[in-house]
Image: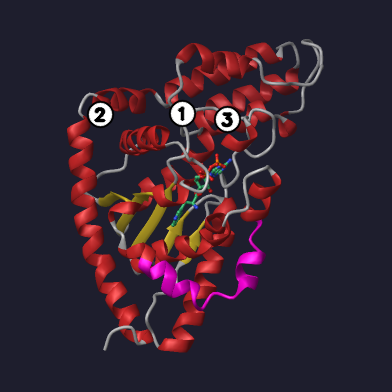
Amino acid sequence: MRILSGIQPSGRLHVGNFFGMMQPSIRLQEEGEAFYFIADYHSLTTVQDPEALRKNVCNVAIDFLACGLDPNKAVFFKQSDVPEVTELSWLLSTVTPMGFLNRCHSYKDKTERGLEATHGLFAYPVLMAADILIYDSNVVPVGDDQKQHVEVTRDIAIKFNNLYGDVFVIPEPRIREDKARVPGLDGQKMSKSYGNILEIFGEEKPTKKKIMSMMTDSTPVEDPKDPSNSIIIDLFSLVASDQQLQEMKDDFLKGGTGYGDFKKRLFEAFWEFFKPMRAKRKELSEDPQYIENILKEGADRAREAASATLKRARHSCGITS
Ligand code: ADP
Ligand code: TRP
């Protein structure tokens, strides 16, 4: 089984990215041949500051490795180190009906938020389809919001195969059911574009401050509180043990404990959960050459796989004999 996923280097990683995409990807590296990459071409649709982009690529590489990506098990590389993918993207675009792209809500969301309506932003799903198809991927672990893009990929692959023969493997999205949509500090989906994120590797003080200033309702300390409708509980459930979670739920129902106290417990569990990853991150940050070597080695392996698929695709549509 070939597993593939990508993450854009477009900012600091947050808890939603971790539980929605990274943790499932890291678990899957035990089950098959995993290919994970940093989608720098994609991030050019939103990050147009070269220095920031370079820094983000470096940070996301360190973050992913610190969170458990094992370069001995998974091929880890930068999207742009495999330029074959942009050529495949063109071949795919020639069979992609506008309707496939018109229905994508990510484009609508982004332009409604004020991003310029560029061709790159509109054609984003075609490049993503090329990413997935060029590695003959079977399974694509992503968060809920990327499911539609994987479905469009399937539709494009089926269309291409119907026209030109059996060129592409048809991939499937793998969305975890339990943590597919992590809420942000304001209760909306956690996303860097909503300014409601909890960074995985933020500094201690600002992280604590963010948690302590989460909005809550005005139930008095002594009154019982509703655990089924609380962002504190939702976030706590991601990082606490079952026992800690049960205790917090009981304390909600009992009354007598204020939200401030629950937030403190949330911060402590959060800080503890990411402790080993913070230590690993520190170690990795001290060795940029190691990171560079991993990405270089990954790119060589990825390129080998990609060029074989591209060759097949070029031949099938008559570009090469
Ligand atoms: P953002 O919404 O902050 O811009 P990205 O779109 O870069 O995040 O998402 C990177 C990966 O993390 C994707 O696979 C996405 O589905 C996943 N992801 C992002 N936010 C969440 C969330 N709140 N809950 C679960 N998964 C998420
Ligand atoms: N669009 C994805 C995101 O924003 C990143 C991505 C690019 C990706 N290409 C991919 C994810 C291929 C999975 C497979 O998160």
Could you tell me the amino acid type at mark 1?
Answer: Ile
Front residue of 312/225: it is: 312
Q: Is residue 13 magenta?
A: no
Residue 272, compared with residue 291, is above or below; it is above
In the image, residue 267 lies at what x, y percent? Answer: 54, 18
Residue 196: percent from the left, percent from the top? 62, 30
Task: Tell me if residue 190 can be seen.
Answer: no
At x 49% / y 23%, what residue is drawn? 270
**Looking at this view, is 64 or 25 the one in front?**
64
Checking the image for residue 284, the label placed there is 2
- Label 1–label 2 contact, CB within 8 A: no
Q: Is residue 133 left or right of residue 218?
A: left
Mark closer to the chain start, 1 or 2: 1
Q: Which residue is mark 3?
A: 197
Measuring 63% from the left and 61% from the top, which residue is drawn there? 104
The disc labelled 2 sits on which kind of residue?
Answer: Leu
**205 left or right of 248 in image:** left
**How far is disc 3 from disc 2 in space, using C-alphas?**
24 Å
Q: Which quadrant is the N terminus positioned in?
A: bottom left
The residue indicated by pointer 1 is: 200
Q: Where does residue 103 sit, x and y in percent of width and height?
A: 67, 65
Please state the total of marks drawn on the protein image. 3
Secondary structure mainly formed by the magenta segment = helix
How many residues crowd mark 1 within 10 Å: few (<14), some (14–19), many (20+)? many
Q: Residue at x 50, y 27 (%)?
A: 199
* Residue numbers of the magenta segment: 87-105
Name which residue type carries label 3: Ile
